[in-house]
Image: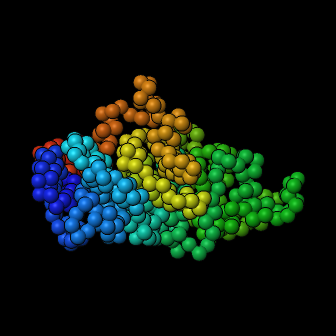
Amino acid sequence: MTQVLIIEDDLTVATSTERWLTMNGFKVLTCHDANKVMSILNEHDIDVVLSDVKMPHISGLELQQKINFLDAQLPVILMTGHGDIAMAVNAMEQGAYYFIEKPFEPEHLSQIIKRAANKRQLEVDNRRLQNQLSYISGIDSRLIGTSLPMMSLRKQVLSLASFDASVVIHGDTGTGKELVANCLHDYSHRSDHPFVAINCGAIPENLLESELFGHEKGAFTGASQTRIGKLEYASKGTLFLDEIESMPMSFQVKLLRALQENTIERVGSNKSITINPRVICATKVDLKKLSEQGDFRLDLYYRLKIANLNIPKLEQRLDDIPILFQHFLEQACHKYKVKKPTPSMEDIVLLTTRSWPGNIRELKNLAQQYVISNVSQEVTLASLLTKDGYQTDVLDGSLPTASLRSLAEQVGRFEEYLLRNAMRESRGRIKDVIDLLQVSRRNLNLKMQRYNINRSDYL
């Protein structure tokens, strides 16, 4: 519930304003002595300050400056008489949120306070996300997220990193398979040796053997010198084979033999070279089904799949979208050396309710576009998505594209995000969740069942 502090020495105005705001669902504290304001702000979580301009002992402008010094993001709304407009304008130039002229319409005041409270909540959330980003370290700073799928993934990665077993990483395009492979390497005893990545779908079949096994000088036209292959170079480290499903069948048997015997022969040589790389593969398809269809060697599949990791889609970890977006914004601002823009609450809602076919890669790309677009003018995420064809303008009556779901689905996704976020902040304490979301116990239980939310996961 939004908590408003009214600072007004006129008891009649203070009482009537307090009564109206209370009737409209605000929690209200009233102060008749401006000298006591700072102690009230230190003792209570105030979301919006509503202050008169002309008061004894201290002006609203001076008070607003003191409040800004204490908390620069706390919105201060000034109530002014007709003759105080110049002072109010000066106060806004120095950081006041808004000024409203007496006598004012109560409904108008309520709308201003709601907007100020939304701004305050967004800044509090941004501050919380910034704090999370500044304190996370180790694998938490690389596989970012507090959702249950990400906590489980980090635990699996740290566990598998200590083994030398080969791993198959399965995940859709853009979910971060190479990042996970990097973590498996960096947290293993092989971390001091090379991490060698190769995209099996990007190398022509006639060059693949030379790329992986290497070649001797003069082995073929253009081989002007001896070249060490990826398998040999990664011998004490890790070889990452991305898009392993794209590897030609004719070469799969050669790779299988090399891994089984731990030896290779460079192209143009008869000499066997001992190798010992840890092999990590990534794929976006089911290799077992591919093998059953005859499009992937079953024996190679069993050789590679000693352990398995599944990377969640972005839509399976909605809780992580705000902090991920903040992280990508910081990366982009550091890269382009510009000031970081602040997304609105509407922007965050949009991020957590739309579909993400491109997963993390798409979110990162959007963050970069958002930073660049806000250098010269303020741009909303909705306008960027519309421009890129992700979303149509709902105001023109056109139908939304496939990347946006129906209204019911979007509302449900955002509701689930809010519930999980509240459960996490409250550490599974149901009473705190009820107080935070202002819902009944029965309603909360029904929603937890609907979204498969288990209290024990957040204790």
Foreground pick, 440 / 12: 12
- On the question of residue 436 being in view, the answer is no
Percent from the top left, x then y, of residue 242?
59, 52
- Where is residue 447 shown, x and y percent of the image? 20, 44
Q: Nearer the viewer, residue 242 or 298?
A: 242
Residue 152 spot, x, y in % from top left: 36, 59
Task: Determine the image quadrant of residue 223.
Answer: bottom right
Q: Nearer the viewer, residue 270 or 220?
A: 220
Examine the rendering and report whether any part of residue 191 can be seen.
Answer: yes
Left or right of residue 435: residue 50: right
As drawn, is 67 to the left or to the right of 264?
left
Q: Quadrant of the C terminus?
A: bottom left
217 on left or right of 312: right
Q: Is residue 175 left or right of residue 6?
A: right
Q: How is the image coloured?
A: rainbow
Residue 336 image offset from top left, x and y in percent: 60, 59
Please tell me whether residue 183 is drawn above or below residue 285 in the rendered image. below
Q: Residue at x 82, y 65 (%)?
A: 226
